[in-house]
Image (cartoon, rainbow, N blue to C red):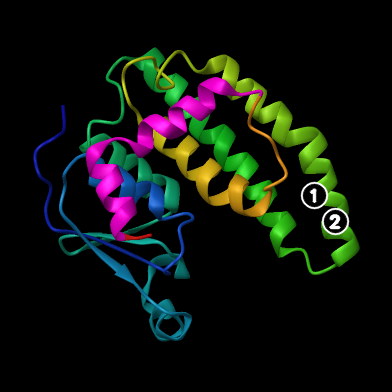
Amino acid sequence: MTSPQPPQLKITYFPIPVPAVLARLALTYGGIEFEDERITSSVWSERKDTVPLGLLPVLEIGNDVYVQSMAIARYAGRVSGLYPIDAIQALKVDTFLETLVEILNKCMEITSAKDTVNQREKRVQALRDFLPKTFAFMEEGAKGKYVLGDQVSLADLFVFNFVSNVVVKVFPEFSLRSYPKLIQIVQAVKEIPRIAAYLAAHA
């Protein structure tokens, strides 16, 4: 069950998926209207000094401005009914979210490395070590069609986003065959009608 429609929302970020897409997907799932502003780096350079901490993405709720991508995503998840009320279930969701944030940061370190040799070594480490380790942990933690079983949560949207926009594009050689529950989650999220329509519109 979603919360009542909040004040007018606006998300501002670059025209790339990570990290703002998690909040975009959550609001879309909840059927909550929001302005999806996608700006260029030149526009951002003009606005940066006016934004708290000089960070993107930005969430505007009425006249109030908020930053920090995961804080924004969690808010979007809560107002969209993607956060369980039960404390233990919410803890499970947060465990997945924090795990994915950590691995996403490691992947960003690899893609941003300027030293080609260093980047190659980190890719090898990722494929041999932290990607399999993290995916095995999530595979064991997933309880069914979704992370929590039959209940879709923000964790499922993050799994979908990470696999679709990071693993497939940055580590195409990494096989998901050993993680059938995670594959099922990705497919289930893609088939949610509002999510499917959003993805088709932003392909």
Q: Is residue 49 left or right of residue 9?
A: right
SS assignment for the magenta stretch, majority: helix
Q: Which residue is drawn at 17% across and 64% down?
A: 63
Q: Name the residue under label 1.
A: 123
Residue 165, percent across and down?
Answer: 53, 51
- Eyeballing the image, is 154 above or below 166? above
- Eyeballing the image, is 144 above or below 67? above
What span is in magenta?
178-201
Q: Nearer the viewer, residue 163 or 84?
A: 163
Q: Quadrant of the N terminus?
A: top left
For the residue marked with disc 1, what is the amino acid? Arg
Q: Name the residue under label 2.
A: 120
Q: Tell me if residue 27 can be seen.
A: no
Q: Is residue 173 left or right of residue 14?
A: right
Which corner quadrant of the image does residue 194 belong to?
top left
Badge 2: how crowded within 10 Å, few (<14), some, or many (20+)? Answer: some
Q: Residue at x 30, y 42 (%)?
A: 26
Q: Is residue 190 magenta?
A: yes
Residue 58, percent across and down?
Answer: 35, 62
- Eyeballing the image, is 14 above or below 87? below
Q: Tell me if residue 199 can be seen.
A: yes
Where disc 2 sits, the SS reads helix
> Alpha carbon of mark 2 to alpha carbon of mark 1: how far?
5 Å
Which corner quadrant of the image does residue 203 belong to?
bottom left
Badge 1: how crowded within 10 Å, few (<14), some, or many (20+)? Answer: some
- Eyeballing the image, is 22 above or below 131? below
Is the residue under label 1 in contact with that under label 2 (CB below 8 Å)?
yes
Q: Is residue 181 magenta?
A: yes
Q: Which residue is drawn at 15% across and 53% down?
A: 33
